[in-house]
Amino acid sequence: FFAIGGVSTVVVGLACQGPMTQLVNGLILTLSDKIRPGDEVEFGDGSAGIVVSMDWFDLLLRGYNEHLIRIPNSEIATKRIHNISRDTRGQVKTKFAIRYRDIDRVEALVQNIKDVIAAECEKVITDGSRPFWVHWREFEADHITVLVDVHFDIRHGTTAYYDMRMKVLLCIKKATEMTGVPFAMPARVSLPSDDSTRYLN
């Protein structure tokens, strides 16, 4: 009788382990204030979206494709969490190619890009606390690579951020036109042992 009772206790204990773990993790998640309903989040496994609701056992996430996903609290407890809604700044980082025939105008182009972005993008950070970089970075086989890396007091992922991103790209275009340095246009060419992108020089 006692042996049977002991086995039953173990079985019941194991059966309750899952729900209890969920409950404890739900309590910890709520008290930690890492995320709240309405927050935009990204988890370490790549899942991301808006938190619709949270309870003691799971979290309901609305993905960017509008799919609803329930994630058990025990899984969330082991994931890296990026609360996008609590970001206060955003980054625009891009690179482009110019032709070798325009190499003597690269320095002027770099300065013009900095000047245009600083003048026309009001939220850009230029006080040295964040990168404000425009650099000639690489000699490639058939073009030169220029990197632009700038930061803003605008949260990533918002409409304002994407408006600013477009504005930065337009500033780069304006600076290339001011300097008389066109973008190197990629062209796909077929070689006997290779089929790859080359840039028109």
Image (spheres, grey):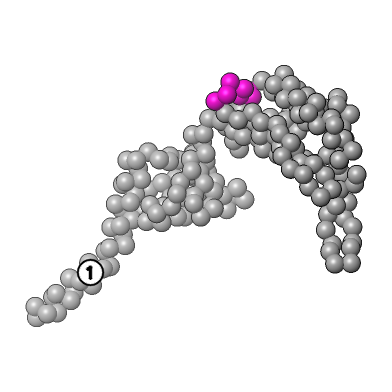
Q: Is residue 154 visible?
A: no
Residue 137 drawn above or below residue 107: below
Q: Main secondary structure of the magenta part?
A: loop
- Where residue 174 appears, x then y in whole percent? 82, 27
- Where residue 73 appears, x then y in whole percent? 38, 53
Q: Quadrant of the N terminus?
A: bottom left
Identify the image quadrant of residue 176. Answer: top right
- Where residue 35 appears, x then y in whole percent? 43, 41
Verify whether residue 174 appears in magenta.
no
Verify whether residue 128 appears in magenta.
yes
Q: Name the residue tied to disc 1.
A: 12
Q: Secondary structure at mark 1?
A: helix
Which portion, as a residue range, is magenta?
A: 123-129
Residue 83 drawn above or below residue 88: below
* Within-10-Å neighbours for mark 1: few <14, some 14–19, many 20+: few
Residue type of the residue flagged with mark 1: Val
Left or right, residue 175 beside residue 129: right
Which residue: 74% across, 43% down? 138
